[in-house]
Image (tube, rainbow, N blue to C red):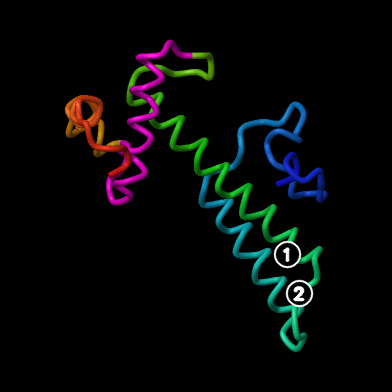
Amino acid sequence: FGIERGWRIPGLETHAWQANATRAPPVDASMQRLRAAAGALFDERAGASGFSLEDVAALAATLEDVIADESLDFVAAARYLNHAGGSGPLDLPAGQWVLTTVLLLFKNPGLSVADFEEKKLVDPNVRLYMSSKRPIPN
């Protein structure tokens, strides 16, 4: 939000704005922050007839940050499951495996990373999707 629109709201900066920042908090913490921001926004405006542009921008920036945190967690989990740890660049085949694994994780919210690892679900499912002629995600 901030990069695309040029707005910076203190405390709601996306990862790209944070210089020398450490890894983002877990998704649960981000969701709690989103709930708190939305709750505060609605509590303050209970009797009002609408929202200000600043209120909507703050909520949009918070939502964007939550989505970015969740996406980073999916990528980190996919890299872990494919033994491609770290944050360095991947070659094309490894990148395809990691991104396909991200889609598998996203499509299966009921399964944890441990489930994928214990049941060895990554390799056969990635092979299935990569050899399929159907669009991903389907």
Q: Earlier in the sequence, mark 1 or mark 2?
A: 2
Queried whether the magenta region covers residue 97, the answer comes back as yes
- Horizontal arrangement in the rendering, residue 52 relative to residue 87 (left or right): right
Q: Position of residue 123 (x, y in %)?
A: 21, 24
What amino acid is found at the position of numbered circle 2 in the picture? Phe
Please tell me whether residue 31 is drawn above or below residue 27 in the rendered image.
Answer: below
The circle drawn on residue 19 is: none
Mark 1–mark 2 CB contact (< 8 Å): yes
Please tell me whether residue 15 is drawn above or below residue 2 in the rendered image.
Answer: above
Q: Position of residue 65 (x, y in %)?
A: 63, 47
Q: Position of residue 59 (x, y in %)?
A: 69, 61
What amino acid is found at the position of numbered circle 1 in the picture? Val
Q: Quadrant of residue 111?
A: top left
Q: Position of residue 9 (x, y in %)?
A: 81, 50
- Identify the residue shown where x is 22% and y is 31%: 133
- Identify the residue shown where x is 46% and y is 30%: 76
Disc 1 to disc 2, C-alpha distance: 7 Å
Q: Main secondary structure of the magenta part?
A: helix
> What residue sits right under mark 1 in the picture?
56
- Horizontal arrangement in the rendering, residue 123 relative to residue 100 (left or right): left
Please tell me whether residue 59 is drawn above or below residue 97 in the rendered image.
Answer: below
Please tell me whether residue 55 is drawn above or below residue 101 in the rendered image.
Answer: below
- Identify the residue shown where x is 39% and y is 29%: 99
- Identify the residue shown where x is 62% and y is 49%: 64
Q: Which residues are magenta?
A: 90-113
> What residue sits right under mark 2 in the picture?
51
Q: Nearer the viewer, residue 46 or 7?
A: 7
- Horizontal arrangement in the rendering, residue 131 relative to residue 50 (left or right): left
Disc 1 crowd rating (10 Å Cα; few below 14, some 14-19, many 20+) is few
Queried whether the magenta region covers residue 107, the answer comes back as yes
